[in-house]
Amino acid sequence: MTNIILAAGVALVFVMVGTPVWIRIVNRLGYGQMIRDEGPEAHLTKRGTPTMGGTVFIVGSLVGYAAAHLFTGNAPTISGVLVLFLMTGLGLVGFVDDYIKVFKQRSLGLRSGAKMIGIILVGVVFAIASLNFPNGYDITPADPHLSFLRDFGPSIGPYLFVVWALLLIAAMSNGVNLTDGLDGLAAGPAGMVLAAYVIIGNWQLRNSCDFALAPNCYSVRDPLDLAVVAAAVLGGVFGFLWWNAPPAKIFMGDTGSLALGGVLVGLAILTRTQFLLAILCGLIVMITLSVMIQVGGFKLTGKRVFKMAPLQHHFELSGWAETTIVVRFWLMSALFVAIGIGLFYLEWMPKK
């Protein structure tokens, strides 16, 4: 528990203090956010707002994680390092994308093909490495199975597992990117899901098969360290949200959205809760589906289902204030997270 508190606290303080410094650096370099001309007119006033803020909470999360292990003397685990690698690697892809946008002063950065290659390279390394490094009980960070509250069904094999992991990584990183359309809209729900994984990691530790082969015990390699990772990123995200809440002083950019998508998928795969992630991230899934429905509906009928996609922009064009949309979407996200945690606990309820 000490590790979790230290990781979250150090990351929170680092990002709270470091974000204003980053804002000054970005302003001095002239790295302001570019705004799509076809977006809502209200967004044009945000042109020039400092961006690439995800850099701060990525570094803050790494500092928080390292500080927690340094102060307690506990060695980092391969599971924790793998999730942080996935977060940092995708964050680097996003940073290059953001840099091209601000350097060339255009709303589009990396070409979609180049961006996807970067995501695939990082994802493949993560997926392959997660199937290796068994501990003394022969448990590896991940296992070639599908999972909901734990692994289920037959093994899908290492090759299909890598493909499955890449699909999850690409879907969630792009989903967080689509959600990051209003001030604080992505950071708030991501923080709630990270808090859920702090709880899940703790619960899996207390009911680990390493301690006792009790009914419903968990075969997760490093549940405590995964909770520490979640806590470190949670502290970083909340520290960033202080400056990103409406009206935002800084945007996370693709640097932050891709990194957040990566860390959420990494935690889901290594805690064996892949399908549970879709419930915990219900708001992100809903926003992603709105884009798919909009594009598919227009291609089939020539008509738009929503006034604009992603979904938050539909409500903007319907006259909702930005803060109203953000707060109500946060409430919806909290409901999804509560449902997910409830389902996770459900199998532990007494059976009559």
Image (tube, rainbow, N blue to C red):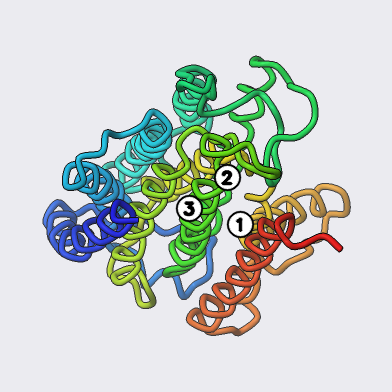
Residue identified by numbered label 3: 202
- Looking at the picture, does residue 223 appear above or below residue 126? below
| 2 and 1 marks in contact (CB < 8 Å) | yes
Of residues 4 and 213, which is closer to you in this image? Answer: 213
Residue identified by numbered label 1: 281
Residue 57, image x, y percentages: 29, 53
Residue 2, image x, y percentages: 29, 56
The mark that comes first in sequence, 3 or 1, is 3
Residue identified by numbered label 2: 172
- Looking at the picture, does residue 132 appear above or below residue 71? above
Q: Secondary structure at mark 2?
A: helix
The mark that comes first in sequence, 2 or 1, is 2
| Label 3 – label 2 distance at C-alpha | 24 Å
Q: Residues within 10 Å of mark 3 (few under 14, many from 20)?
A: many
In the image, 126: left or right of 68? right
Tell me what residue is drawn at x 44 percent, y 50 percent: 257
